[in-house]
Amino acid sequence: MESFAYEFPHVINIPFTEAEVICAISSLKNKTSCEYDGLSNKKLKLCTSSSQISKPITYIFNKSLTCDICPNCLKYDIRKPFFKKGDKSQVSNYRPVLLLTGFSNIFELLIFHRLKHHLVSNNILVNEQFGFHDNASTDNAIFKLMESICNAWNNKEYVTGLLCDVTKAFDSVSHELLILKLEFYGVKGCILNWLKSYLHNRKQRDVLQFFSSPNLLSDC
């Protein structure tokens, strides 16, 4: 990271608007199931349509951001096993799926759109970034790879490929390095401090068909 000769612009720390909150709530999946708080996305949307909760939610979220603190009630996740493929009796053939409350999803969406706007508007994402990037997909990545290979063959050049498959890639991300990288790319101030709080001291509960574990501190 020290090879860059300039400093990236800082993310703009401006308050969330009520319109942003309403948009985030509207984008939630229309689920009737409830997490530990007993409030479904469908109920949240019904309340928002009459402006009953959008104003207080906007105030609470902005207060949380300016105080650099993610509320503990937003750090509780329900973790359920999702079968991938193979033998269903093998634990390794399942991946964990985290279920968040509607309020947690709303706040994550607001932060996500702020970070995305910062990265896109300042051209921080490279063209080779195909994942989690608008108008880009694995199809684009494959096309780019095949184009490079064909061009090399046409020019009578050698082609070498190095493919890496990281097991449980997202689970192996170092939170310390993630925070350092965000700060390097201009994510500073209250948003960075809020993200530190968001990653710290999280709790998860494992839920199976006939079993539910007590709340346990994760390694976050």
Image (tube, rainbow, N blue to C red):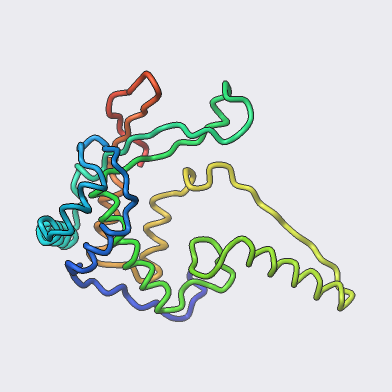
Give the image quarter of residue 96. Answer: top left
Left or right, 162 with respect to 85, comes to right
Of 217 and 181, nearer the camera is 217
Residue 218 drawn at (x, y percent): 34, 35
Residue 145 drawn at (x, y percent): 71, 66
Residue 31 drawn at (x, y percent): 32, 44
Looking at the image, which residue is at 43% across and 81% down?
6
Left or right, 86 with respect to 59, comes to right
Give the residue at the far top of this rendering: 210
Give the residue at the far right of this rendering: 156
Of 196 and 104, nearer the camera is 104
Q: Total number of numbered labels?
A: 0
Residue 216 drawn at (x, y percent): 30, 29
Of 96 and 123, nearer the camera is 96
Quadrant assignment for the C terminus: top left
Looking at the image, which residue is at 49% across and 76% down?
4
Query: Relative to residue 24, is residue 95 depicted above or below?
Result: above
Looking at the image, which residue is at 64% across and 63% down?
139
Query: Relative to residue 2, is residue 215 depicted above or below?
Result: above
Looking at the image, which residue is at 27% across and 74% down?
12
Query: Relative to residue 71, is residue 132 depicted above or below?
Result: below
Left or right, 70 with respect to 6, comes to left
Give the image quarter of residue 16. Answer: bottom left
